[in-house]
Image (cartoon, rainbow, N blue to C red):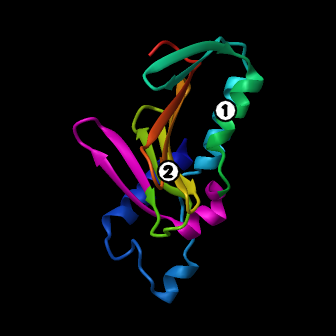
């Protein structure tokens, strides 16, 4: 976990210097960013769930009605695959996103926020919430916002991964002419929440 501690120190140092964030000096373009490896972390979480037999529950919520069912690894992998975005590939991610970080003194948690000024569809925001100084700094959760659509409608996905426990996918569908509708999928495999 020495790498994680170094990453935290580097991010805090970068986040505390306003001139380093978003700077457009030509010298800065050669500096390698040390972003949290969100893509690799999510893949390792999926592999963790795939590696042991555990009951997984799926909850689908639409129009105030909840349907639940037990799902198998294949269905889990298909749903969890929604989190494995091309935009999280390290090269694309580091080119399009800026990082800020802070330590919440009340909760003692460290937050890394990755945001982009790119208004095109795709990944818009990533938040990584970590618990430092626990012997092996642990990621608590990852939050992603993704937008897609066309001239007739907009779809916003708000996705939340809780490490070793569950994930949620909230979809907000907004047609150009009409009311927005929402649907939510929650999958739980860890200890009860």
Disc on res. 144: none
**CB under 8 Å between callouts 1 and 2?**
no
**The image quarter in which residue 148 lies:** bottom right
Q: Residue placed farthest to the front in the image?
A: 177
Give above or below for 177 relative to 63. Answer: below
Task: Please say whether residue 160 is one of the residues in the magenta stretch.
Answer: no
Q: Nearer the viewer, residue 83 or 156?
A: 156
Q: Residue placed farthest to the left in the image?
A: 106
At 23% across and 42% down in the image, what residue appears? 105
Crowd band around label 1 with a 10 angstrom C-alpha radius: few (<14), some (14–19), many (20+):
some
Q: Is residue 137 visible?
A: no
Q: Nearer the viewer, mark 1 or mark 2?
A: 2
Q: Nearer the viewer, residue 82 or 19?
A: 82
Task: Please say whether residue 95 is one of the residues in the magenta stretch.
Answer: yes
Range covered by the magenta-colored residues: 87-113
Indicate left or right for 152 with 128 as reference.
right
Give above or below for 153 relative to 142. Answer: below
Disc on res. 175: 2
Estimate the x, y position of residue 21 in percent, counting from the top left. 39, 71
At 55% across and 41% down in the image, what residue appears? 1
At 48% across and 12% down in the image, what residue appears? 192
Estimate the x, y position of residue 52 in percent, counting from the top left. 72, 17
Quadrant of the image containing the C terminus: top left
Q: Give the spatial CA distance, label 1 vs label 2.
A: 24 Å
Q: Which residue is mark 1?
A: 79
Estimate the x, y position of residue 174 in percent, counting from the top left. 47, 48
């Amino acid at each position: 976990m020495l790498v994680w501690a170094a990453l935290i120190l580097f991010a805090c140092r970068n986040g505390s210097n306003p001139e380093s964030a978003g700077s457009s000096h030509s010298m800065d373009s050669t500096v390698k960013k040390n972003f949290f490896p969100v893509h690799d972390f999510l893949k390792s979480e999926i592999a963790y769930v795939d590696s042991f037999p555990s009951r997984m529950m799926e909850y689908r919520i639409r129009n105030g009605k909840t349907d639940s069912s037990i799902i198998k690894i294949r269905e889990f992998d298909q749903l969890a695959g929604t989190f494995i975005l091309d935009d999280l590939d390290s090269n694309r991610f580091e080119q399009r996103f800026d990082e800020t970080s802070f330590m919440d003194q009340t909760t003692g948690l460290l937050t890394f926020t990755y945001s982009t000024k790119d208004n095109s569809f795709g990944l818009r925001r990533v938040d990584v919430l970590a618990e430092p100084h626990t012997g092996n700094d642990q990621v608590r959760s990852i939050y992603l916002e993704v937008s897609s659509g066309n001239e007739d409608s907009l779809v916003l996905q708000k996705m939340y991964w809780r490490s070793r426990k569950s994930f949620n996918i909230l979809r907000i569908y907004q047609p150009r002419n009409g009311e927005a509708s929402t649907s939510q999928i929650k999958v739980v495999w860890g200890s009860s929440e």
